[in-house]
Structure formats: C-alpha cells, structure tokens
Image (cartoon, grey):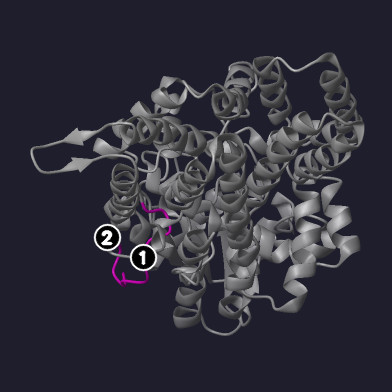
Amino acid sequence: MAVMLATGLWGLDRGGMWGDESVTFQVAQRTVPQIWRLLHDVDAVHGLYYLFMHAVLTVHPGEVVLRLPSVCAATATAGLVAALGVRLAGPRVGLWAGTLYAITPMTGHYAQEGRSYALVAAGVAGATLLLVRAVDAGGARAWWPYGTVVALTCVLHELAVPVLGAHALTLALLRVPRKVWSGWGRAAGAVALLLLPLVWVSQGQSGQVAWLVPPGWDRVGRLARNVAPGPAGPVLWGSLLLMAVGLRERRTAAVALPLLLVPPGILMTVSQVRPLYHDRYVLYALAGASLLVAAGAGRVARVLGRVRFEGRRTRIGGRRVRAVVGVTGVLALTVTFLSQLPVYRQDRSAAHRPDNLAVVSALAVSRMRPGDPVLFVPSVGRLAALAYPKGFRRVRDIALRESAPRSGTLWGLEAAPGELRRRLAAVDRVWVVAERSALDPRRSPPDPVERTKLAVLAAEFTVREEHVHEERVRDDVLLRLYVRRPAGEPPRDPTGVRPPGVSAGAPGLASSGPDANRPRAGRPAHPPTPRLSPDVGRW
C-alpha cells in the first residue's frame, strides 16, 4: 500500500485535465438536481460516481483533489490484493501480489485519473476477498457484506457485472457444497434485481459507446501486456512463465484465473455483436494476474527452499536458502519497477494523455481579445472552456444557445443551423478551437450544426492566424483566427496549409501512444473523426 500510495501521488498534479476528467470535474460541481437531470439523458452509468465526486469537490475543486479518490482506491486495492494472497497462499505470496499490483504501469495510469475505474477495481478486490471469507465461513450472514460490496461496485460502473461470472467459476473450481451455492445465488440475484433499473436506463444511452469497435486478437495481446508488471521484454515473459507455474497452486488459481479471464472474455465475446469492450473497463482483472504471478513465484521459492547445497567446508540450506530467495524476490521487484521508470515518467506528463485542455485555455488567454467570438468544432471542444473557464471568460461563445448545466447536457446546446448562420454573418472575425482534422472541408459530419460550421467557414471566411504546437504527432489541437473573406476572393482549401502567424503553444493535445501501447492505455481506437476527447462523457 505504501508503494502504491507513493506511486499514485508522484506527479499527480500534471498540469492539465484531459476530456473525460474534465467531464467529471464540471459535472461534479453542478448541483445535485442538475446532476440528476443530466443522468436522465446521458452518463447514467456514472451517476453514483458523479454524486460521490460532487461531495469530494465540495471540499476543494482542483485537479489534485479530483484524482485523489483514485489514488486512495488504488492504494486500498493493493492492500486487498495482498490480503487475498495472504489468505490463499501465505504472507510472502500476499506481499508479492500486492507489490506487483502496485508497480504495474496500468495500475499507476488509472490511479491518476479522475474517473471511476480505480474505485471499481477496489470494489471488485474487496468483493473477491469477501467471497473467499464467505466460502470459508459457510454461514448465511457472511453473504450480506459480499452482496452489498458487489452491488455498490456494479452501480458505480455496470460493466463490473461480469465479476459475478468470475466468482461463479471460482465456486465451481473450489467444488463448494450446495449451501455455499445457495448463499451466493441469493446475493447475486439481489445484485441483479438492484441493477435492472440502471441497465434499462443505460440501454437508452448506448449511443455513448458507439465509438467502440469489436476487439480482435490485437486487443487480447495488449491486455496481456497491460496486466503484466512490464509490457515487453524479460519482465513480460517472466511474468507469463510465473503465471503458468502459479496455476499449480489450486486454491489461488481458482480465485485468480477466473478474475483474470472471465470479465475480459465475457466483454470481448459480447463485443463481437455489440461492442462494449475497453481495457479500462476490466482494470479490476489485473488483480488476478498479480495473484497468479505471486503464486508462481511463491511455488518456485518453496522448491528452492528445500534445496541443500553441500560443499567440502560449507552446508547451506533451510533458513539461509529462504533468506536468499527473499532477497532475490525484493531485488526482482525493484528491478521490475526501475525498468518501468521511463513509462511512469511519460505517463505523468499532461501531453501524454489524449487531450490537454489546459493548453487550449492558455492559448485563448494569450491570443483572444475581450469580446471576440469563439466557435468550437465540434461542440465537444467546449469542454476546454468548461474545465478552464479563465481562458474563455472574456470571449463570446457564438454558437451556444443554452449552457451545459442549465440544459442538462455535457457541453451545452447550440443554435440551430439557420440561427448559427445569422450569428456568423454578423461578425467579421471568429476564433475556432478544433483539431486540424475536424476542419477538413471534405468531412461531412452527421450533425447539421457541425456541417453548417464547416460550410460557413469554408465559404465566407479565410484563415488569418493559427496557433498550435510545432511538433505534430498525429493531429494538433489548434486555435485559428478566421476573418471574413473580401468580396470577390475565391474560397481556399486550408487543408494541410499552415498560414502566417503560426506560433508554438504548449504540447499538442493529441499526442501518440495510448491506443498503440501500454503507457497510454486509455485511448480507444475509433474512425477518423474529430479526435478532441472522442470518448468524453462516455462509459
């Protein structure tokens, strides 16, 4: 827990929220009636989390406070994984399992994110420990704590429900008596009944995850790299080998293996028909990997502890060998952590997240004049103004019809196409906040308001200035000043052209990596649409 807490607090104030975090930040600061109204139309799956964060941010609305619950949850999860290891295989395996969980890069990534995934992982780890205790106790009362924790965890995020399948397989592998099955069945049934209203409401909001795609074998490989304490090289292969050895520990494997395989397996299978899978939705499965690796290491340590080394003058065995094995284990964990330091350092950079909305606000402060009109393309880009209002306090949101809190939406309601055309016709200059791909005139977004924005900009305006980070990785988020085109001047195609007035701002919001490799596991794959927070406010 100390290792996890130190890792979570390291670099917690990275100087910028990305899209999903900004949604948590601005929604949690609304009143409870406003949050309740929002949940009727969007993000019902995050309702309990938003209400919890509403209480947290009442203390102090800041980026560090936003992420502290995730740090604390990850710390608790490390302790719960250790407690599971102690109960299943002894203190040494428990210590190794908890430490492995704490130094796994995927754990550190979500421990520093203002979303619910670390809290869900803590709930699942606690429920799994209560399951083992209920099996050992055998009484009916032991299932009440288990059912309560599972219910709270699934309400926190309903895609934690597959953990019930993992626990059912655990009971089958342990060959528990009918009495235990009966107690677990009543608890699971109560959880299912409690979740039915949430499932019914969230089905109507399933369009929020329309960006997900059916996972292929590449996602399986990426998940294997994510749950290991090292995403590549000897650490990865050593972890997989120790997992295989850990399967020989029957009781530990009966708990850890279903937790590792069943939730991802269920979501990946369902996603072939209706995509619902993303690595972060099964963060809680990582506990199973840590337990298996630690169990395998514990088995190897026991075998070595029985070895006797006899020489002409020395005889080494028993306690001495066990001491050597213990020191070796500590060194192995230390080397594993040190080998991942570049990953940790990179992950603690604001530029490494999918978006850095603080950059947009900083550019706005330095470039916009009081009263300037600003246009967000697409409207989700308004999250920058909601998360960091200082940069946009002096300007006028020309497309906004009703604010996000008042409209019960995530980023507000915009004017109809006709009204938007009239508003743009009344100005001679307008600042545009967008990713470069979003301004491609060849695009035809399905939303008529977004089509109107592109059409008016292309037909009536020309680019005067553009401010963006110089080092393009995939697609810079830029700040463009459009001015009205002189009469008779033909429209120009601004695609790929960097006009005069370009300045180097802060790091681009769309830096590379999260979809392709472990350090940025939070980035989903999606079609080439505007990439400013493609999954903000989504499950």
Is 222 magenta? The answer is no
**Element at label 1:** loop
In the figure, residue 271 lies in which quadrant?
Answer: top right
Outermost residue to the bottom: 370
As for residue 501 lying within the magenta part, the answer is yes
Q: Are marks 2 and 1 in contact (CB under 8 Å)?
A: yes
Tell which of 49 and 151 is nearer to you.
151
Dividing the image into 4 quarters, which one contains the C terminus? Answer: top right
Name the quadrant containing residue 184. Answer: top right
228 to 422, vertically: above or below:
above
Residue type at tag 1: Pro
Whether residue 351 is visible, yes or no, is yes
Q: Which residue is at 83% across, 29% downward?
A: 138
Residue identifier under label 2: 471
Residue 293 location (% of width, % of height): 43, 34
At label 2, counting other C-alpha atoms closer than 10 Å, the crowd grade (few under 14, some 14-19, many 20 or more) is few
Residue 118 spot, x, y in % from top left: 61, 51
- Percent across and percent down for residue 102 are 48, 52
Residue 198, compared with residue 11, is above or below; it is above
Using the image as rendered, state which of residue 164 and residue 117 is in the foreground: 164
> Of helix, strand and loop, which mostly describes the magenta segment?
loop
Give the magenta-colored segment's residue range.
Answer: 499-511
Q: How many marks?
A: 2
Name the residue tied to disc 1.
Answer: 507
Going from N to C along the chain, the mark reached first, 2 or 1, is 2
For disc 1, the neighbor class at 10 Å (few under 14, some 14 to 19, many from 20) is many
Pick the quarter of the image with the N terminus.
bottom right
Amino acid tagged 2: Glu
